[in-house]
Image (cartoon, helix red, strand yellow):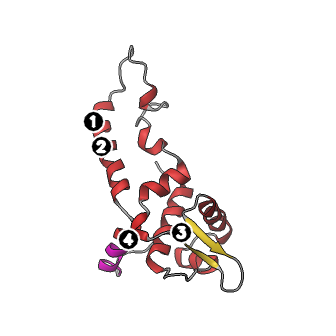
Amino acid sequence: MLSNTCKYALRALIYLGKFSENDKRIGIKKISEDLELSSAFLGKILQSLVKQKLLVSTKGPNGGFALSKNASEITLYDIVVKVDGEDFFINCLISLEPCKTHDPTKPLCPVHSQYEKLRGEIEAFYKETTLEIISEDIDKFEDIIKL
């Protein structure tokens, strides 16, 4: 499961990938209103993403946030790993330990063989899906998609 912080980060970067243009920054107030998120909480998340080099920001009346690189170069995987770490992609579905720490002298959990394949497909999806791809999908379904 992704943390709420990670979900908010994904929504914010998808939003910026869709609506920020060239060197134009979007202010935290606009982003938080459009996404219906707490401005204070979102601000902390976005500042963290600036430190992680996924976003750039400027202060002042024309300040705000923008992607640090082209939307085609930022994947969902990049965002999840920067916010939540790799646990989502390596942890066992029902055990408290990552599968990579499994003791080979003990049996695997009952869902390991089925979930391992699915986890690989999920990881591939996150690595292959860029903000640009999502932005194009939003254009197709804009009337039904609410970030």
On screen, residue 119 versus residue 88, left or right, reads left
Query: Which callout, 3 or 2, points to the residue nearer the camera?
Result: 3
- Disc 3 to disc 2, C-alpha distance: 31 Å
Circle 2: residue type: Leu
Mark 4, other Cα within 10 Å: few <14 / some 14–19 / many ≥20: some
- Disc 4 to disc 2, C-alpha distance: 24 Å
Mark found first going from the N terminus, 3 or 4:
3
Report if residue 63 lies within the magenta region: no
Q: Are marks 3 and 2 in contact (CB under 8 Å)?
A: no
Disc 4: which residue: 132
Q: Secondary structure at mark 1?
A: helix
On screen, residue 111 versus residue 83, left or right, reads left
- Work out whether 62 lies above or below 95: below
Q: Which x, y percent locates residue 123?
A: 36, 48
Report if residue 139 lies within the magenta region: yes
Q: Which mark is residue 68?
A: 3
Circle 3: residue type: Ser
